[in-house]
Image (tube, coloured by chain):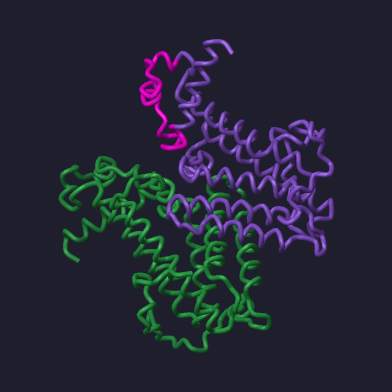
Chain colours: A green, B purple
Amino acid sequence: MRKGEQTRAAILDAALDLASRDGLEGLTIGLLAERMQMSKSGVFAHFGSREDLQVEVVREYHRRFEDEVFFPSLREARGLPRLRAMMNRWMEKRIQEVTTGCIYISGAVEYDDRAASAVREQLVHSVSMWRDALLRAIRQSKDEGHLKADTDPQLMLFELYSFTLGLHHDARFLHLPEAVQLTRDALEKTFTSYQTPGSNGGAPSSAGNSESISPNASVNPDPSPAATLTSHHTDSR
Amino acid sequence: MRKGEQTRAAILDAALDLASRDGLEGLTIGLLAERMQMSKSGVFAHFGSREDLQVEVVREYHRRFEDEVFFPSLREARGLPRLRAMMNRWMEKRIQEVTTGCIYISGAVEYDDRAASAVREQLVHSVSMWRDALLRAIRQSKDEGHLKADTDPQLMLFELYSFTLGLHHDARFLHLPEAVQLTRDALEKTFTSYQTPGSNGGAPSSAGNSESISPNASVNPDPSPAATLTSHHTDSR
């Protein structure tokens, strides 16, 4: 990495940190310059405008989210094991974010009533890609026979997504010590309600269900074009 | 109402409006003075400080919430009919707030990482009172035999609360047209999962279950001290 790229990456890292703490709207070039011990014009040299910077912060968060939550989950068998892995990793990330904040959640509130903007667009795009990935995993779990044939994928997605919002709310705003356990219980109750009787696709007791994974499995072993968060997906119910 | 009280009420009304739109932290005396076509000192004459004003806005929102959601629900029979009424009215309010915003939700994000402050304290207090009221209604539904004996009230509260967060997120941030229907479906699924088989306490088909309510029923017919949102309640699981 060249010097200029290193500096840009360091600025982006600090910006993500500030935006997680204060929200994307709390992110200013002045604050960032102070944190980086740089001049404002030095920051501007790497990001043309405050809005460009905000958009890049959302993109950077999304890249890290894919690396931490999505790609590692693709190592699990298609269907319920993969869906459960996605939810588990997402929960782990949410638990970390109880102290640092999450720009998807704060952004969803900051930009819920704002006119169209590049930042809002990027946020909605990133959140929607993750939701589409979850929806695909739910549909694949039906196809594999792990979930009942009458499972409504949109309803299941609504339940799963709402519980992670509830976790963030209860842990970060109300400081409830039982928030994590309640979230686990609620997620498990939802999985159980949709699971095909007798199917044990990826239930907690079957952890280590890795017969299809070689030690050298690549990060993204699924060759289908639908296997990346960034693919497009028709979101029909 | 005297002139001074009228002016104070009008300022509070405008302040609640601004805070719903821009968040409590977006509420400034300057913006409010402009909206009211008053001087800043005129506003300060009614509210000693910006923080006092913010706290009063949270209190005012809470009073309206009680009037619109909580007190009318107490007219329903104790147990599941009352719990369902609380959730239905809350959902109606949330649907209205898709356009106006909700200071409980935006406040939960604005103040999630802030040091203790009078505003944060009032927000947590108001939200907790509503959650305690829901918890009481869940426990009463168990006592009445409407919900199964092994119902975990905290888990049920977590589910119900998360779905209203999900409604706000999906409708207001993502603009999903199916958000309201998904929320109804998720709530109904939760009620059904806890309901005692054979019990029909307040299911949608039994609307008008009002044999215990006279036309002159007072707003708050429940004489128990636990019947107001403002009562204290030990929140042990």
Above or below for B205 versus A30: below
> Is residue B24 found inside the magenta-colored segment of the image?
yes
Tell whether B27 sits left or right of B124.
left
Q: Which residues are magenta?
A: B18-44
Coordinates of residue A203 in the picture (x, y in percent): 62, 77
Coordinates of residue A60 in the picture (x, y in percent): 32, 60
Above or below for B1 versus A213: above
Please name the residue shown 35% across and 80% down the image: A225
User: Which of the pair A60/A156 is nearer the observer?
Assistant: A156
Please name the residue shown 76% across and 59% down the image: B151
Quadrant housing residue B23: top left
> Is residue B43 found inside the magenta-colored segment of the image?
yes
Coordinates of residue B45 in the picture (x, y in percent): 46, 13
Above or below for B209 versus A91: above
Image quadrant containing the N terminus of chain A: bottom left
Please name the residue shown 49% across and 82% down the image: A78
